[in-house]
Image (cartoon, grey):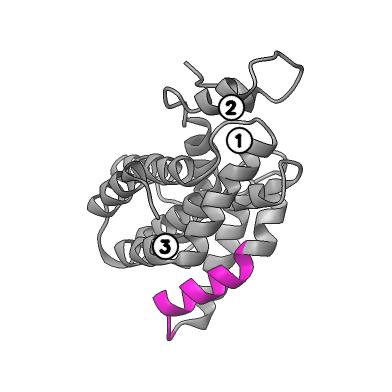
Amino acid sequence: MKSKKEEILDSILLKMLSGITFEAVKLLVEDKEIHNLQDYANVVSIKRLNFNDHGPVHMKTVAINAVKMADLLNEAGIKLNLESEGIGSFEDSKTAIVIAAYIHDIGMTIGRQNHEKNALIIAYPILNRLLKKLYPSDFRKVVIMRSLITECIVGHMATQKIHSLEAGVILVADGCDMEKGRARIPMMINTASRVGDIHKYSASE
């Protein structure tokens, strides 16, 4: 069952969108597999690893951040790669961005190490399912979008070089989630200091 915070974030996200991007988020919001993956990602992150929030609230927050950034770029006349390369529209790029943001940390269900790469194993069948609904008569677009979303997910930790503005948006949007209290739960569970990932401590106050 979704928390009130999750429902509010989903509502905010949907109100920001229209067209195919809106339809994509509707599918994401209603997808039980994605919801359970997001929840379990937080179990692993907070309870098992003592890191901060990498679950539904974080992923939805990153999605909102990413949409805002994509819109700002578009309003400034900066074309994202799909549009500038003539293989898609701004709405296609925004759809790829929001899908990637919404599921970028599902690899945390396996663990922290290589979670951005492990996410791809889990995401592949999900992306196939979603994209075939969004682009039922355009197989080429399904293939392109799946590859772009894959780049966005695998690139969000800056461990792999990225080559699109879309992936850059996800990288920055993820880093901008410094919501107050994001790390408070793991800090309450274990307050002992240790050498480790800054993700345990960021935004804990």
**Residue farthest bottom in this picture:** 137
User: In the image, what residue type sits under mark 1?
Assistant: Ile
Q: Earlier in the sequence, mark 1 or mark 2?
A: 1
**Can the viewer see residue 102 in this picture?**
yes
Q: Main secondary structure of the magenta part?
A: helix
Residue stretch in magenta: 123-137
Name the foreground residue: 152 vs 110: 110
Instruction: Assign a secondary structure to mark 3.
Output: helix
**Can the viewer see residue 164 in this picture?**
no
**Residue in the picture at 60% in, 63% down:** 123
Residue underneath mark 3: 28
Q: Is residue 155 left or right of residue 205?
A: right
Query: Are the residues tagged 1 and 2 within 8 Å (C-beta)?
Result: yes
Q: Residue 102 lies in magenta, yes or no?
A: no
Q: Is residue 80 left or right of residue 160?
A: left
Quadrant in the picture for the N terminus: bottom left
- Within 10 Å of disc 1 (Cα), the crowding (few <14, some 14-19, many 20+) is many
Name the foreground residue: 99 vs 139: 99
Instruction: Assign a secondary structure to mark 2.
Output: helix
Name the foreground residue: 139 vs 21: 21
User: In the image, what residue type sits under mark 2?
Assistant: Pro
Distance (Cα) linking label 2 and label 3: 27 Å
- The image position of residue 50, as x and y in percent, is 65, 30
Q: Earlier in the sequence, mark 3 or mark 1?
A: 3
User: In the image, what residue type sits under mark 3?
Assistant: Leu
- Within 10 Å of disc 3 (Cα), the crowding (few <14, some 14-19, many 20+) is many
Q: Quadrant of residue 201?
A: top right
Name the foreground residue: 144 vs 181: 181
Residue 46 disc label: 1
Q: Earlier in the sequence, mark 2 or mark 3?
A: 3
Residue underneath mark 2: 186
- The image position of residue 186, as x and y in percent, is 59, 27
